[in-house]
Structure formats: structure tokens, C-alpha cells
Image: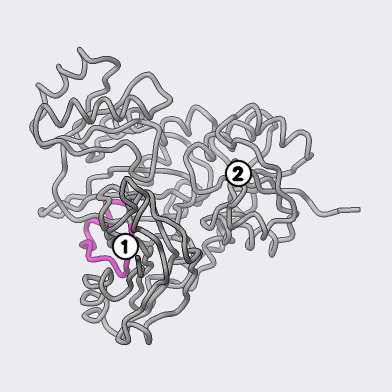
Amino acid sequence: MNTKKKLLLLGGSHAEIPLIKAAKELGWYVITTGNNRDGLGHPYADKTVFADFSNKEAMLELARTEGVQAVCSGCNDFALLSTVYVCEKLGIPGHDSYATSLEIHHKDKYRALATRLGIPTPQAKVVHNEQEFEQAIASLTFPIIVKPVDLTGGKGIHRATNVEEAREAYKNATSRTREDHIVVEEFVQGTNHGFSAMLVKGKVAFAFADNEQYYINKYLVSGANTPSTTQNASLAKLREYSERIAHELHLVDGILHIQYIEKADGTPFIIEICRRPPGDLYIKFVKYATGIDYPKFIVKAETGEDISSIADVPTQGFWLRHCVMSDREADENGCSGIVRDVSFAPEIQKNIVEKFLWFKPGETITDKLLYKAGIVFFKFDTLEEMTDKTARMTDLVKIVID
């Protein structure tokens, strides 16, 4: 008979593998869930119950049926919102309230929060219908960004340079969202970055920053390297903004992850913010670059354990996390776009720390904007080498396609 304490983890993809492993190392019996029966993380769990983790009531029923003592979010906003809902209903520690979580994870609510707190954020308009949309685009300067309030990973996000493009983007965003409104906002020019912090008693106890890379899909991060090029003054501002948000919303201890654009004048504009782990093994990237067991601290925080022992250490060395993606896909006849292998140029071989490839030879790429063959971690000897090879990474590591 199983006597271990039970943890329900909402997710089971490759992104959740570090969390599953960390939870098991901490002594938990891990139950994963989700609709994807081919999720690469599920085999690492003690048990899997396939269900829709975006369905809050279904997750509540699953948690009750399994008699779990803790619930952890996977790397998805729907998973996070269901997680906090379940924990609030069952009185399980480790998470903010459902209402607080909506203020952070729904883009319209966060924009309003940032404006109230004086935190730099793109000027945004919430629109519920076509009339409001036309009024919004008339009041903003092109280019603009049109996006759903509830989706991540670049889904439904479009940059529009004119009215015609904006209207097409509006149709796409409204067709994808589960909400009755979307956001239209100004386009912010600058360099893209991530900032991942651990809050303890409302203060930033640990922080990590990176530089983001994008490939074909300009709204889906394809890679990140560190240390960040962000100015120290900007990083200090991000710490202060994080603590301002934590104080305002009375956030519990745990992760606060931010995507931001650093403008030419050094101002960091926060674009996205969340309280769940970033995807594509980012938390393993943090562990490699700092030596801090980030997955384990995230699990400890989400299960209500003390994380005050985390050390605020800087990046050690020069690192890159790279998602292996393609610039080609199958044509309308289903021809071409067939994956054969992934090739690595000789000059990049020595930099490989870990390869996690999940492609299957013979499979067809149907959507080049989303397809990934795997993730690779690299370490470099110098900043110059990291900068040079990062810029050439899509030539150094390539999917071999027929």
C-alpha cells in the first residue's frame, strides 16, 4: 500500500519532467494529468490520470478522488489557474488566491495592475467587440500588437502595421480566446529578455535573467542565453517592480517569472508575467547556469514548504538553451517536411552539455511555427563565443528534412 504523500501535477509534457523528478526526490508520490496521452513527462510519474487540466472542476474532483496533499502547476497558464482554484477550494497551501492569480495571468488585468502601480507596460486597450476594436486601433500608433488575454506561447498574437492587418489579427485572436475580450496594445521596440525570481516574504530572494531568441515564430521563444545583456540598473528595477507587485497582491512565496523588453534608454517594459514555471526546460536552464536547484525550490514553494534557504547567486559561465526548430513544413499535398535527423556542426559539438531530442524519424512537420525536435543545452568558454554561436545556432544545429 502506498504511504507516500500525494502530489497532483497539472501537466505531463517534456516541460514538466524536471518538476516530476524534483517532486519524487522530495518524497512525493506524483500524479500527472492532461489531455496529451503522448506527453513525455507522464512516464516519469508514479501515476497518470488523463483529463483536461484547464477544467477547474474536473481538477478539483480529481484532487478529491486521489486524496492529494499538494497540487503543482505545470508550465501552462490554464494549469496554473486550475491549480490555484483547487488549492483554494481544498485549503491547500503554496498558492495565491484564484482572484489574485487572474490579476497576474490575464493580460488585461495585469496591464491595469501595472498602470496602477506605475510599472512600465505597453499602452493597452481592452476590446469586447468590433466597434471597440475600431476605436482602439484609431487611438494607438501603428505598429500594434493584437493578442488574446488568456493564451501563452505566442498563440493568437499578431503584429499589425496597418488597419487591414489589424482586422485580420482581431479575427484570429477572438477565434482562439476563451474569454469575451482581447487586448490591443502598442508595439514596444527593444531587446527581449526573461527575468525569473523567487519571492520570499514579498522580497526577491533569487533572480535570474536571460536574452531571448526567436526563430520563424516571432512570438514563441526558441532559445535563451545568459548572462543577460540587460543593464544592472534595469535588473534592479525589475527586482523593485517584482516586490511592488508582491506587496500589492500579498503574493505567497515562490516563482515570479517575467518577460520584458529593454528599450534603448534602458527602461524594462514588462510584457508578460506569471507565477508558474516557464516551459521548454527553462527551469533546468536556470539550474545549469546558477547551480541552484530551481525545479526543487519551485516544488517546495508550491507544496507550502520553506524556501528561504535559496541563495541569490549570479550566472556561472556562459549558457544557452536552444529549441531545435524548422523553417520548413509539409506542403498542401503532404509532401516534404519529413524529418530524418538533427545535425550538429563540428564546431558546436564541444559545447553540448545535454541533448534531449524527441523527434521520430519519418514524422511530418505540419506547423513550422510550433514544431520542436528537441532541446539542447550548451556551455561556452567566453561571452564572445556564446554571442557568436547563438547568432548562428539555426545553422549550427539543423533538422534534416526531406
Span shown in magenta: 222-239
The amino acid type found where label 2 is placed reads Leu
Q: Secondary structure at mark 1?
A: strand
Badge nearest the viewer, 2 or 1 = 2
Q: Residues within 10 Å of mark 2 (few under 14, many from 20)?
A: many
* Direction from residue 258 to residue 18 in the image, left or right: right
Name the residue: 41% across, 58% down: 372
Name the residue: 29% across, 32% down: 111
Give percent across and percent down for residue 247. Answer: 42, 39
Viewer-nearest residue: 61 or 68 = 61
Viewer-nearest residue: 23 or 397 = 397
Q: Secondary structure at mark 2?
A: strand
Q: Which residue is tagged 1? A: 210
Give percent across and percent down for residue 108. Answer: 32, 28
Residue 171 colored in magenta in the image = no
* Direction from residue 164 to residue 345 in the image, left or right: right
Name the residue: 66% across, 30% down: 58
Give percent across and percent down for residue 363. Answer: 46, 59
Image position of 333 with respect to 149: above or below: below
- Numbered tag placed on residue 10 in the rendering: 2
Q: Earlier in the sequence, mark 2 or mark 1?
A: 2
Give percent across and percent down for residue 217. Answer: 28, 50
Location of the C terminus (image quadrant): bottom left
* Direction from residue 256 to residue 171 in the image, left or right: left
Q: In whole angstroms, how far apart are the C-alphas of marks 2 and 1? A: 26 Å
